[in-house]
Amino acid sequence: MASSLTQSISTATTAISGIGTGVASLSRLASAGLTGGAEAAGDILGAVSMFSDLGNADDWRVRLSLPYWPSFRTSPVLAPLKDAGGMVFPYTPEVSFSTAAKYSAIPTTHSNYQFQAYENSAPGQITITAPMNVEDSTQALYWIAALHYFRSITKMFAGFDPKAGNPPPVIFLNGYGSYVFKNVPVVVTNFQTSLGKDCDYISCDPKASTMAIAGGLADSIGGLSETLGLSSLSSLTDGLGNVGGILGSFGVGGGTDAGKAYVPTKSTFTVTLQPMYSRSSARKFSLDRFVTGGYVQNAFGYI
């Protein structure tokens, strides 16, 4: 039975993912003002273009990747970030960073000069201060997704998570071309924003319930109703609670329909990143290769 349930859940997840992609595509067309005849209704494409994935190798915008973990990749709340190709800062942020070499003075008696002993080098923290202006409901949904992303990326796996006990995920930073930030492994150590009182707020409806879609599809998913012991899953109200309860025990899905959200039209995200290198990656580092630009095309970025 466990094997059958696992297979059914896998089938349901695949079907839901496909429908989610289609719904997202229709939503993006509607938000861009494109009608059924593909006629542009107003010139608003410029307002949303910065929130989309250009699919261009020369894209130099600052972005943070989504973790390679199913919940981050399939989350309906984070769908706008997945469509954009990661947590892309839509407006040019201010990025500050440093690098340091640490030396310690050697106490020497009867000497006019101190001697310095090298200890180590370290890339300093990277601080990103990014304006997050919002002009319409599409961008408001992106703002909600970005907020949820930073709240999630600063938490450890716990409870009944398959990776319970593991620290927050390591992600990759890219921006300003391969010679500046190229696949730099980082963790988010701090995130800060504020909801100002001197700006307008835009409402959006981040309604996306994975379980609602699962309930509507249950009849077309072979074996699921029999496995769950339900006579019919054609009615969303009949099947939603049971499907949600069983899949929820596996950490899968969950409703996100919680009414409207309100987003400030002007705000600033401040993110602090710490470069994170393992012992293995540190041992593989070569200064000669680094100096000659040998890591520019590397899949793993040293800074």
Image (cartoon, grey):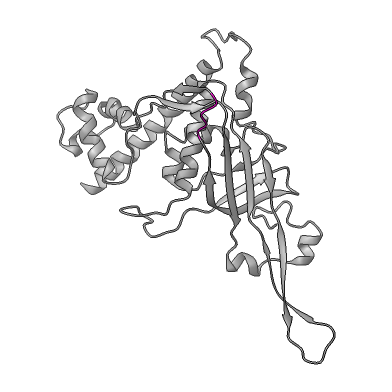
Q: Residue at x 26, y 32 (%)?
A: 222
Q: Residue furthest right?
A: 112
Tell me where the magenta segment starts and ends, as one range.
195-199
Q: Residue 122 or 297: which is nearer the viewer?
A: 122
- 285 over 129 or under it: above or below: below
Q: Residue 217 or 206: which is nearer the viewer?
A: 206
Q: Position of residue 197 (x, y in %)?
A: 51, 29
Q: Residue furthest front?
A: 198
Q: Say if residue 71 shows up in the picture.
A: yes
Q: Say if residue 234 shows up in the picture.
A: no
The picture quadrant where one finds residue 204 is top left
Q: Residue furthest bottom?
A: 110
Q: Position of residue 176 (x, y in %)?
A: 72, 42
Q: How many marks?
A: 0
Q: Residue 72 or 199: which is nearer the viewer?
A: 199
Q: Is residue 62 left or right of residue 202?
A: right
- 105 over 93 or under it: above or below: below
Q: Residue at x 73, y 84 (%)?
A: 106
Q: Is residue 83 left or right of residue 23?
A: right
> Does the magenta segment cover residue 186?
no
Mainly helix, strand or loop, the magenta region? loop
Q: Position of residue 88 (x, y in %)?
A: 60, 37
Q: Residue at x 53, y 9 (%)?
A: 35
Q: Is residue 18 left or right of residue 99?
A: left
Q: Residue at x 38, y 26 (%)?
A: 207
The picture quadrant where one finds residue 303 is bottom right
Q: Position of residue 219 (x, y in %)?
A: 25, 26
